[in-house]
Each structure stands twice: as structure tokens, then as C-alpha cells.
Amino acid sequence: MGAQRIAIFDTTLRDGEQSPGCSMNLEEKLLMAHQLEALEVDVIEAGFPVASDDDFAAVQAIARECRRPIIAALCRAIPKDIDRAWEALSGAARPRIHTFLATSDIHLAYKLQKTRAEALDMIREGVSRAKSYTEDVEFSAEDATRSDWDFLVEVCTVALAAGATVLNIPDTVGYTVPDEYGRLITYLREKVPGIEKATISVHCHNDLGLAAANSLAAINAGARQVECTVNGIGERAGNAALEEVVMALSVRRDQLPYETGIRKELIYRTSQTLANITGREVQPNKAIVGRNAFAHESGIHQHGMLSHSSTYEIMTPESVGVRRSSLVLGKHSGRHALAKRFEELGYPLDRNGLDKAYKLFTKLSDQKKEIFDEDLLAIVQDGITSIPEIYKLKTVQAMAGTAMFSTALVTLGTEAGEVSETALGDGPVNAVFAAVDKLTGLSGRLLEFRIHSVSRGADAVGEVFVQVEFDGLPHGGKGASTDIVDASVRAYLNAVNKAIFARRNGKHATGGTPKPTAQEAGS
């Protein structure tokens, strides 16, 4: 018998969007919905149509354009909400009305000011009204985990009798713990007549950091739909993170014999799509999709990774769409990782060279939390080899504006004298990089561009770090100035001179994944 299928109900566009700072306009919601469709989630909860005209328009547009997944719309168990939800969903290929009502005594008393009997009547009427529009009706008992269990049995029984096809038992305020939640799901399965005809769904919040764990406990107890969000965004501390639930089911099939239809190799892309839309960067240590999820700094860990990745990784980065693991160099790193990184940068070191480099590296790592490639190349330049400055910046001028292409004039000093070149670009930094490429005859692919203020105030010095690929080999560069364009071209020239040095010394690399050239990457 094959593994049982768990439906993934994504509520990024509804509950997730309620997270402060994560609101989206119509175009952004459509972009995210299409990415969720590509990820192959089973259900997209597109919004709360009665909440606003914008929410209504978003649900209507997503229902019209996304034809593969079920499209759900949330509504309270009151007639005007249900009617509005159906109006928005009516063009969907696979519509679902998702109606809800609070069932805990604290919500009934203080929010709804209803008795239990009145609540049951509202559930019966609400689900029946939704059922008159579509066969697929989900009912949620808001704050279920703080509700009386026997009353929940009555709630589920009434919702089923009225036509609900999905029963959601949400941990609305992130209150429950895995063992308790599992027992609640088991209790309902045993006590609610005919519950096997419906899908049991769970919707967990992360107030105690247990959303994913609670969701998995509910699955083991018989739930077959998990409601979650990309990157775990949502009200307060957020929802169960889609990527965490899906990858837990994938990695621990020995303990969790279930499967989803999610295209796991698109998880990272989906995470980044959401981060780009909302402008909310994923926390570095976020499970699965954080930039540190496949990064290793400890020397012992790095040695193990270099021997075999399974020593410290329980899944491959490629399995979720991350290009590769990274060995982050810091004060805990060892010689193996340092030697490996110098080799990747085109500077394989012998034992004597590695000893010198390691001494400089440990000294620098006491001053900085993280060592970047440009720092390593500075170590090579300052302590191991002498990299000549083939090209020196003499002058740079750049013009930019909203109604014009940016232009740049760069003058470089060489052994033969001064040379100048002009170039156009998408932004002044892009233009000066293009001018340098013309002067040097090199074509750089910009891998990374970072800038930070070294000091305070309006006249602060800005430090620019770049990584540029020449001949398939990455080179770091660093420049500083009170003028950002000046700092940028100095950093780029720093990388150019290192590339020329590597080329003259036969340090070339081949292959690699194409990346945007300096001309393609706007600034």
C-alpha cells in the first residue's frame, strides 16, 4: 500500500497577507498565485472577499486565471459573507467556500456574544447556504484548541450534516502542543458520526514555535489536509511554514509515511518570490529556505561536509531548489575549508602557503564575524602573493536621471598611459562597470553587490563589496569612498586586477551556471 496523500492548503494570500508589512496588491497576488500553482499546492486560499473590494478583485482574478488548484475564499458564517465569497469564486474551475465561526467559550462570550446553541444554528445555516452554491465547502471551528471537546463534537456533527466536505480544527492562537493536538484529532475521529466522509484539516499558528510540529502530530492522528504559508508568514508569530511541513514529510518518511504533491525543487524559488513581493527578507536561520540553512561554519562540520555532505545535511540543497551548500568562513572554520575555498577562488596553496594564510585568516576572524571571498583574496594579496594593480582609477564621471539612460566616463591608468571610455547603463553603477569592461576587454558577470556605511552622517564613507565572474572564476573586490559610484568602480577594478593576475598565472575555471553580466544587472 502506497503512502497516504496529504493535501497542502496554502493560505499565504489570505492569512499570510495579514502579517504586518506583507500586504500585496492585485498584480502581486496574481504573481504569487501563479507561483503557488507551479509549486502544485492543492488549495490556494485567495482571500477574504467581503473584507474589501481589493480582496474581492484578487479572489476573482485568481479564480479566473489559476485553473489547476482548488481556489478557496474565506467568509464568516453569515449570509452576506457567504454570498460575497461565491460571487468572487463563481468563475473558478474548482471553487471552495471556506466558512468559519468561533467555538471556544471565550470567543463566544467576549467576541460573538452568542450561546453555544446560537453558534450551532449559525453553523448549520452558514454551511447549508454555502452548500447551495458549491459542493466543496470547508468549515473551520475558530479557536478549536481552546474549545470544549464535547462541544466540538457537536459542532463537527452539525457542519457535516449541513454539507461540509472539509472540517478544519484550527489552533488559532498557537496554544496547543503536539501530544494534546493529536489526542484532540483522535477524539473527534472517534466521536463524530460520519467524520470519515470528510477531510480533517489543521491550521496551526506559531505563537509557541510549535506550528509545524503540531501539524505533523495532527497528520499522524488522521488529519489529511494541512493549512500553511510560504516562509511561515501570518498573524502574530505566523502560520505553519509550508516548506517545513513538506520537507519533514519528505525527509522522515520512516516516521511519517505520507506524501504531498508539492514540487519540492520549487520551494526556494517560491520563498524568494514571496520575499521579493513583500520586501520581507527571510530570516537567515529559517529552516529550509534561510540563507544559513545549507551553510556550515564550524571547522568540524566543514571537514565532514567536504568528506561527504550527508555528515551534516539531512537533505540536499538541490532538493528544494537551492543551487549548492556553502561553507561560511568564520572563527570556527578549519584549515580544510580554508584550503578548499582558496582552491575554488583559483589559488591552490601548498602547505607553507596555507600555514601563512591560516595565520592571517585567524587574526582577521577575531575581528569579523564572517569572512568573505574578498577578505580571502586580500589575504592572498597581502600575505601570500603580490597582485599587481594593472589598472588604476584616475577619474570617473556619471550622469543619471529618471528620464534618461545613465552615462559614464571612466579614465584608467595603465603601464602605457591613460585610457578613457564612455558607456550607457541602467543606472550609474551599471554604466561605470560597462565602461571598465570596454577598457579592459574583460566581460564580467556580476555575482554579488553589497554596500554598507562605514561611518555615520550624511558624509559617511560607503564601502562596496562585489563578486564578479571572469573566465568562469569568481573574484572579489572592495572599494570605499564618500561617493558610491566611485566606491563601486574601485571595487570592480579590484576584482578586474585579480582576474588578470589569475589569468596570467594560468588560474582559469570553466563551466558554471550563467549569471547576469555587469551590463545586465542594474544598479
Image (spheres, grey):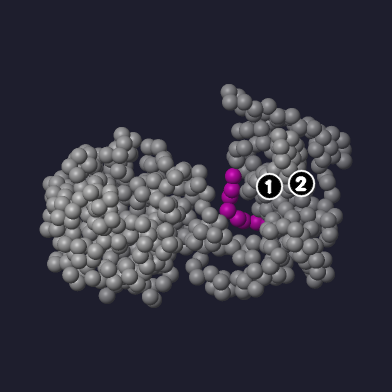
**Residue 60 x %, y %:** 28, 39
Q: CB under 8 Å between callouts 1 and 2?
A: yes
Quickly name the residue at label 2: 494
Residue 98 image point, x, y percent: 24, 50
Instruction: Say which residue appears at 59% left-offset and 48% top-offset.
Output: 515
Residue 508 covered by magenta stretch:
yes
Residue placed at 42% from the left, 58% from the top?
207
For image coordinates 68% across by 58% down, the residue present is 370
x and y, in percent, of residue 339 in the image: 72, 67
Q: Secondary structure at mark 1?
A: strand
217 lies above or below 375: below
Residue holding disc 1? 466
Q: Nearer the viewer, residue 129 or 385?
A: 129
To which quarter of the image does residue 395 belong? top right
Q: Amino acid at mark 2?
A: Asn
Query: What secondary structure characterizes most of the magenta part?
Result: loop
